Amino acid sequence: MFIQSHETYMKRCLQLAAQGLGKVAPNPMVGCVIVHQNQIIAEGYHEVYGSAHAEPNAIKQVNDELLKNCTLYVTLEPCSHFGKTPPCADLIIDKGIKHVVIGNLDSNPLVSGKGVQKLRDAGINVEYGILDEECRELNKRFFTFHEQKRPYVILKWAQTLDGYISRWPLPENKTENWITGNESKQLVHNWRTQEQAILIGHNTLVADNPLLTARLAKGKNPIRMVLSKYLELDANLNVFNHDAPTVIFNTKQQETNEHTEFVKIDWNNRTQEVLNYCFQKGISSLIIEGGTQTIEQFMQTNAWDEARLFINPNQTFGNGIKAPLINLDNKIPVTVGKDWLYTLQNT
């Protein structure tokens, strides 16, 4: 009989886990398969925050006697503590599973090796580190949150071929200021469903009056965040509607209204203040969509993980507001509609 490798089963776990993107945060995405005699006989993943984890979703599909002769594969170390659900490690022990294969150990201090130790103390054969890099990449938001005590930060902007993000002064017809095509807009809205919060600066808010929602995609709207030093904001701005909660970081006001929270911060330390707020609130990912000053502030403080840059190769403005500067040497874009998309990691 051909014996499948651990990597083969873990790849299937990763495929399952990815289905939880945008639905389980701040929990990690986790996938699980149960194998008997070289065959996957059950699959599960963590589907929605607060619901059952991947392991019980797979285990419930198999009768108890058969489980005793199975191997359980899971992308992340089974939890060993009570949260919104009981510990998965306890369930695995109770079911008499004798072999567990894990992708990553969990960085959450509530788990962090305790799940593996609990399984081993119960006499279970435990292996880990299978497709470790792939499993870490899947849960880059989760690991950044627990290891660096801040959200995973994505910088996103669009620019013309000659390096501008906007005309200035702004044209009366806003369509003259659009840079990317419909395919790119759709993609950005999909990205918004994957992240817990979205941030812009005061100037972008006043100039564009954006909704900052994911209305062109299926999924949750992110929490809207704005950096506005002096709070010179019209109450009729779209971010004050009820589509999503809004947080306004400022230097004047600390107050919470129905859908809006005003957070008073030290403006000279504003990037760290935003990151600290997100960590305290359990927000594990943040996408920053402008403008140039806000994006460059996070660049200058090295408080970012990934940049996603659209360029319209068929458009030039000649003058206006310059785009953030980033090195694209030897970077190859992918095509989204008629636009170029560059993705860069802050390594």
Image (spheres, grey):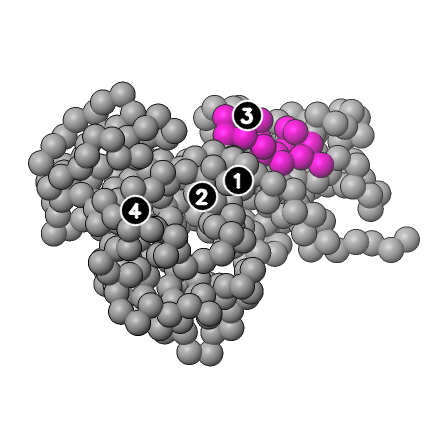
Q: CA distance from mark 1 to mark 2?
A: 9 Å
- For disc 3, the marked residue is 51
- For disc 1, the marked residue is 217
N-term-proximal mark, 3 vs 4: 3
N-term-proximal mark, 4 vs 2: 2
- Give the mark toward the camera: 2 or 3: 2
Q: Are marks 3 and 1 in contact (CB under 8 Å)?
A: no
Q: CA distance from mark 4 to mark 1?
A: 20 Å
- Give the mark toward the camera: 3 or 4: 4
Q: Quadrant of the C terminus?
A: bottom left
- Give the mark toward the camera: 3 or 1: 1
Q: Which residues are magenta?
A: 43-58
The dot on residue 208 is 4
Q: Residues within 10 Å of mark 3 (few under 14, many from 20)?
A: few
Residue 54, given in percent of the width and then of the height, sits at 61, 34
Q: Nearer the viewer, residue 168 or 27?
A: 168
- For disc 2, the marked residue is 192
Horizontally, residue 232 falls left or right of residue 54, namely left
